[in-house]
Amino acid sequence: MKIIVPIKQVPETSNVKMDPETGTVIRAGVETVVNPLDLYALETALRLKEQHGGTVTALSMGPPQAVKALKEAVAMGCDDAVLVSDRKFGGSDTWATSYTLAQAVKKIGDYDLIIAGERATDGDTAQVGPGIASWLDIPVATYVARIETVKDKHIVLERLVEDGYQILSLPLPCLMTVVKEIAAPRLPTLGGKIRARELTIPVFSTENMELEPAALGLKGSPTKVVKIDTPKVTRGGKVVRAGDDEAVVSAVDELMSFLEAKGIV
């Protein structure tokens, strides 16, 4: 079984900053990590490899420093990795990103399964995984919580829905996005770290991929952020201290008056 896992390098949650001019995430000079939800996809792929044999390839689109995320995936147990990187990809929305990644999958070649995380913590759209499946014209299952069987070129799985679980059987090749419930991610091993350090990761770019120039980057993105506002939290409240029974009664009366004035009660 040949499995491809798209992963993303994201800013640490506390360090997310946006460029007010382009509406894109500022990545330069910001500490980054592997998207936490992608770790569940990696673990799922590695377990399938252990059960059924085959290979796992980590795939990431980003600036050159995204190679760090790919090497972490290799340290966890992936067999190889591919970086999709080119300045012309900069500013891609989910449409342009999924298109570019789908073309990278085609360049990698034969595959049986693509496993993606539920969403990325910086964009929080959950659109790239299904978008890749759409460009590749393959079946897709989202919010997968458990894999039951892989047999006869089909995968049977359970996906999380509003009122429980839905059991699906998908023909291979297909794509699925997974939720945290599916598995606990393993830690990188010392041997894996050594292999990752020595591994040369190929780079796919506009120079060696078949791409439509008009579909790339900011210009190829039909959705754009037009305005960014930082929420302002104001706390002009009043503190009422109730040190005895009489003060408690007074505090309750004052609270009720406040709620009535606001039309809450």
Image: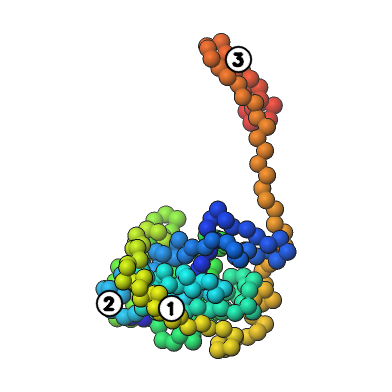
Q: Give the Cα distance between marks 1 and 2.
A: 20 Å
Residue 114: quarter of image = bottom left
Query: Under tag 1, what secondary structure?
Result: strand
Answer whether labels 1 and 2 touch (C-beta < 8 Å): no
- Kindly identify the residue that appears in the image at 59 percent across and 79 percent down: 86
N-term-proximal mark, 1 vs 3: 1
97 over 258 or under it: above or below: below
Decide which of 259, 209 is in the foreground and name it. 209
Q: Check disc 1 and report the residue beneath it.
A: 81
Q: Amino acid at mark 2?
A: His
> Are there few (<14), some (14-19), or many (20+) residues within 10 Å of tag 2?
few
State the image coordinates of residue 165 (x, y, percent, origin top left).
Answer: 38, 59
Decide which of 156, 176 is in the foreground and name it. 176
Q: Check disc 3 and report the residue beneath it.
A: 250
- Kindly identify the residue that appears in the image at 39 percent across and 64 percent down: 40
Q: Check disc 2 and report the residue beneath it.
A: 52
Q: Nearer the viewer, mark 1 or mark 3?
A: 1
Query: Under tag 2, what secondary structure?
Result: helix
80 over 164 or under it: above or below: below
Decide which of 140, 48 is in the foreground and name it. 48
State the image coordinates of residue 255 (x, y, percent, origin top left).
Answer: 61, 23
Taking the image as shown, residue 2 lies to the left or right of residue 14, namely: left
Q: Nearer the viewer, mark 1 or mark 2?
A: 1
State the image coordinates of residue 69 (x, y, percent, origin top left).
Answer: 46, 69
Q: Amino acid at mark 1?
A: Ala
> Are there few (<14), some (14-19), or many (20+) residues within 10 Å of tag 3?
some
- Kindly identify the residue that appears in the image at 45 percent across and 72 percent down: 70
